[in-house]
Amino acid sequence: MIVSLTLHQTNNATFKHTIIPKQAPEPKPAEYKSCIQSPRQVNSIEEFKKLHAQYIKSGLDCIQHNARELLVACALSNWGCMAYAKSIFLSLEEPKTFDFNILIKGHVDKKESKEALLLYQEMWERDVKPDNFTLPVVIKACVQLSATKEGKEVHGHATKLGFGSDPFVQNGFINFYGKCGEIEQACMVFDKLGSNKTVASWTSIIAVHCRAGLWTRCLELVASMTSRGLRVDESSLVSAASSCAHVGSLDLGRSIHCYMVRNSKSLNVIMQTSLIDMYAQCGCIDKAIQIFESMKEKNIHTFGATISGLALHGDGKRALKIFSRMISEGIYPNEAIYVGILSACSRAYLLEEGFKCFDQMRFDHQIVPNSQHYGCMVDLLARSGRLKEAYNLINNMPMGPTDSALRSLLGSCKIYSNVEFAECAIQKLRELNACNSGDYVILSDIYGRESRYEEMARMRTEGFDQGLIQELGFSEIEVKGNTYKFVSHDRSHPWSAELYEMLHQIEWQLRFERYKPDTSDVSSDGDEEEKRRLISARSQKLAVAFGLLYTSPGAQIRVISNFRMGKECHRYMELVSQIFERRILVRDRNRFHCFMGGRCSCNNYW
């Protein structure tokens, strides 16, 4: 551009002056960047590629900071593409630890764990040292791959690099060892943290014990955490509630509920669902339903916990109503929901409804039945006395006979004293190499009822010869926050004298109700007096006697047993609930029995 200026001087002389300015300076990359969209604002890989082209055209991609921004956006965004992110990574002349971390995390987030481990290996080959952000992500990749050997090698690297007491790193190893089933190693890592333990460390070790089914230890860890003045986070509270559900500790469960309410502005869906499950499994189904009805937001897990809880209490009709309500609200059932609803139908003798739900699952919701669904249908048929149909269904299961289905048939054979199908079930279990001591005991009991004492003795001997040891049956009762455990004819407790005196008083009063002990379940060829002695102090009776002695008049008695309730104990509990005017709740291995006023919630169908 040429600019002409005319200047008039006093002597009237005219000068013509031409100015040729310099070319405007090239804008700096920073000036270009101010006009270009940030990688964080991109919403798709197509937009990102266009933005990347602008960076290349302007030379911005040559600046390390900008290249990293591009790498972060492409690797970690929901729309990201790892192949494209890898191309950006390869364009870096000397990638640093940060760059490797981003790419490794991107692969792990997208479940591409093998690629993540290869990058970690490349770091070492390039002499780029991992930091405390690298190692937790790499160990997560090992968890995803169940790569125990590689995970232990990474643990060794962490120690050599000086991260042995870094909680951010070590928490990942606690989780890793827990998911690999090495609980002792996880505890060792946790203990070595010493005073460096964080809330996340406690949460990790609690989760490890919860996943392993070590419910009592899980609760002990939560109690230890609170005693140190640490605030228990949501995850640990959910684990604690789940643990209470499994051990049946209602008092502790209530305390956890109170802690949740005191320390949270509002309980989210996960916390409320865990409380539904806890109250249902601890016998307070009405409280579980109350929480369910009060929830503003429900998901499939909430409905599942409620349906399963109602199934456990034998309330099949209410479970079906909740199931219908779930579908009407637009939540479609999954495999787990159908296990719950079919189980509810089985425990409530809802034969027609059970088959209707089974067909609905297959045809309306296109869910292929698994072994659990078939097991529920076998149980439904067998409980209702249709043993031949149940046996035929087992033989026609697409996945072949399963031990759980065969045990459902075997248990029902005991109810109906059917030797033929019990023998068939045992034979199938033998073929699966799945027989346990309980299976032999059930068949021997059936032989005993039929006075076939030689076969009864042979079954007991066969189980013993195979080294099968029967799990010791026990019953527990919770009184004033403490749990007391009893086995049959238990005299190990300091209050045994009072306990057996109470048993004697109970039996004395039951005689006025024309109670006569039913010894038909006793697998013994002894005389009637010996059989009566054997059933007089069973663990459930001892637990109830303890409850009558050490709880307030009119208070509910809650007993948890690890075996299925027998016919004789069932009748005994009905009469005790009537005479002593107590509500007695018994959770056996299969379901809840609520005795009140001489009747049971199961209506003698279990």
Image: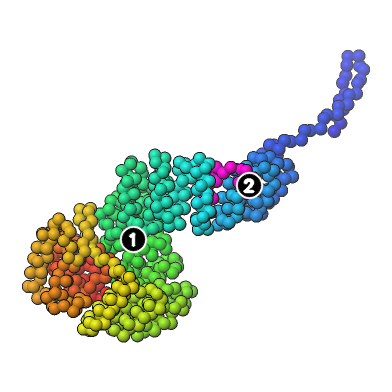
Marks 1 and 2 sit apart, C-alpha to C-alpha, by: 51 Å
Residue 222 position, x and y percent, is: 33, 49
CA neighbours of label 1 inside 10 A, class few (<14), some (14 to 19), many (20+): many
Our reading of the magenta stretch's main secondary structure is helix
Which residue is outermost to the top?
Answer: 11
| Number of the label disc, if any, that sits on residue 125 | 2
63 displayed left or right of 499: right
If you read the primary sequence from the N terminus, does the residue marked by circle 1 or circle 2 appear first? 2
Residue 543 position, x and y percent, is: 18, 62
- The mark lying in front, picked from 1 and 2, is 2
Residue drawn at x 21%, y 76% as measured from the top left:
523
| Number of the label disc, if any, that sits on residue 277 | 1
The three-letter code of the residue at mark 1 reads Asp
Residue 539 position, x and y percent, is: 20, 65
User: Is residue 484 highlighted in magenta?
Assistant: no
Query: Looking at the image, which is closer to me, 395 or 245?
Result: 395
Residue drawn at x 68%, y 39% as measured from the top left:
63
Q: Which colouring convention does the figure follow?
A: rainbow
Query: Looking at the image, which is closer to me, 522 or 101?
Result: 522
| Number of the label disc, if any, that sits on residue 601 | none
* Residue 197 versus residue 212 in the image, above or below: above
527 displayed left or right of 372: left
Which residue is outermost to the front?
Answer: 465
Residue 101 position, x and y percent, is: 58, 46
Residues rendered magenta in the picture: 122-141
Badge 1 element: helix
